[in-house]
């Protein structure tokens, strides 16, 4: 039997939509921009998290810097309702997230770079660090040369494309040149994270500048290949590192969401990724999972120990 998620709009209309809960907000959206984080350790970790940007969306200037092709805001690109979080920020055509695991390699979700989903990730995408907002109302327009990297291959790829699969989902990409200007992230080498441990995630939801999803927890921890969380996750967060808030080690890679909403009978609001159409308002709002309304969705992360780096 599918899990049920009940969505209540600001017009108090109950929407029942048939879909896989691949991404949504839990109760209250806790995401923050990197400049809003007070913890210096987390700010440093954020420097080692990357996204994939189509090469046509970056222009190399004569001074060596790269200019981002920012064409629209998230609000305008999707048709968000006024007041939706981060709606006024730029949204570029990024693909997934990932992190620096060694000077010569990075980790992301397997489905992000699988040939089944994208043709030759290294030929068509740059690996971009530092796509973040430095201060309020100061979107990133130009990136330093060291922020834009290239990859030349995939050394590990594990991904089962079956829709029902809750199996390993990871990939290791190789950089053309070593990344030496930032630290490789530390990660768990053995064992499993404790039940109910506090966690956070860094990544690039919906082509937005880098965000942190803080103050969340492990909610299911029995499976040897993944653990489940209540992280605020969006399309674009796939491949994001999930950190132990106590040790600052990477515990997992965000890969998917679980949970279904049954079909609606009287109305059929459309979905765009992580947003549903509020038909009376004529615009899109963020999907929200509330326990009080029966939501039991979770977000899965492949355990980092599954990669066997050694």
Image (tube, rainbow, N blue to C red):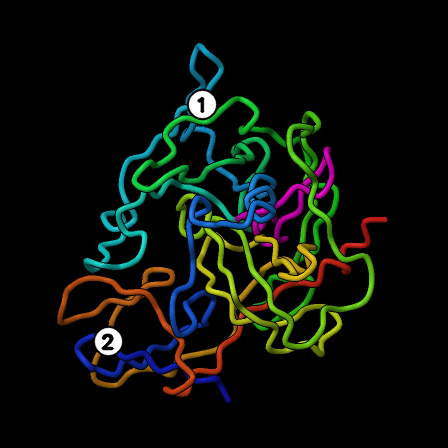
Task: Kindly state the secondary structure of the residue where label 1 is placed.
Answer: strand
Q: Would residue 10 appear left or right of 148 to someone viewing this image?
A: left
Of pointers 1 and 2, the one earlier in the residue sequence? 2
Q: Position of residue 41 (x, y in %)?
A: 61, 47
Is 105 covered by the magenta stretch?
yes
Q: Which mark is residue 85?
A: none
Identify which residue, 286 or 249, lies in the foreground. 249
Picture coordinates of residue 145 (x, y %)?
53, 22
Residue at the (74%, 42%) spot, across then down:
155
Residue 182, placed above or below residue 65: below
Residue highlighted by disc 2: 9
Query: In which quadrant of the rendered view does residue 11 lie?
Result: bottom left
Residue drawn 27% across the image and 53% down it:
78
Disc 1/disc 2 C-alpha distance (Å): 41 Å
Labelled pair 1, 2 in contact (Cβ < 8 Å): no
Along the line of sight, the residue nearer the viewer: 166 or 187 = 187
Residue at which label 1 appears = 66
On screen, residue 158 versus residue 236, left or right, reads right
Residue ID at (58%, 73%) = 164
Q: Nearer the viewer, residue 241 or 53?
A: 241
- Residue 179, given in percent of the width and then of the height, sits at 67, 30
Q: Residue 119's spot in the image, x, y percent?
A: 55, 40
Residue 115 in sight in this render: no
Secondary structure under tag 2 reads loop
Around disc 1, counting alpha carbons within 10 Å, would you say few (fewer than 14), some (14 to 19), or many (20 or more)? many
Depth check, front residue: 29 or 305: 29
Q: From which residue to which does the magenta span run?
A: 97-116
């Amino acid at each position: 039997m599918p899990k049920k998620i009940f969505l209540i709009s600001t017009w108090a209309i109950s929407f029942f939509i048939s879909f896989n809960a691949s991404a949504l907000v839990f109760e209250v959206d806790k995401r923050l921009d990197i400049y809003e984080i007070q913890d210096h350790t987390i700010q440093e970790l954020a420097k080692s998290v990357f996204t994939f940007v189509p090469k046509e969306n970056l222009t190399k200037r004569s001074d060596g810097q790269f200019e981002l092709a920012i064409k629209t805001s998230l609000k305008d690109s999707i048709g968000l309702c006024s007041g939706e979080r981060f709606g006024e920020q730029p949204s570029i055509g990024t693909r997934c997230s990932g992190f620096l695991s060694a000077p010569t390699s990075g980790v992301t979700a397997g489905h992000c770079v699988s040939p089944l989903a994208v043709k030759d990730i290294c030929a068509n995408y740059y690996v971009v660090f530092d796509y973040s907002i430095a201060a309020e109302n100061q979107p990133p327009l130009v990136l330093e040369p060291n922020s834009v990297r290239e990859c030349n291959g995939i050394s590990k790829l594990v991904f089962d494309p079956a829709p029902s699969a809750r199996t390993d989902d990871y990939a290791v990409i190789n950089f053309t040149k070593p990344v030496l200007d930032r630290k490789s992230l530390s990660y768990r080498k053995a064992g499993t994270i404790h039940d109910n441990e506090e966690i956070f995630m860094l990544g690039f939801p919906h082509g937005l500048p880098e965000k942190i999803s803080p103050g969340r927890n492990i909610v299911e921890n029995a499976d040897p290949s993944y653990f489940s969380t209540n992280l605020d996750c969006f399309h674009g967060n796939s491949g994001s590192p999930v950190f132990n808030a106590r040790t600052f080690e990477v515990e997992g890679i965000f890969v998917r969401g679980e949970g279904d909403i049954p079909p609606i009978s009287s109305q059929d609001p459309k979905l765009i990724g992580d947003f549903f159409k509020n038909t009376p308002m004529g615009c899109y709002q963020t999907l929200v999972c509330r326990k009080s309304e029966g939501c039991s969705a979770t977000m899965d992360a492949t355990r980092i120990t599954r990669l066997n780096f050694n």
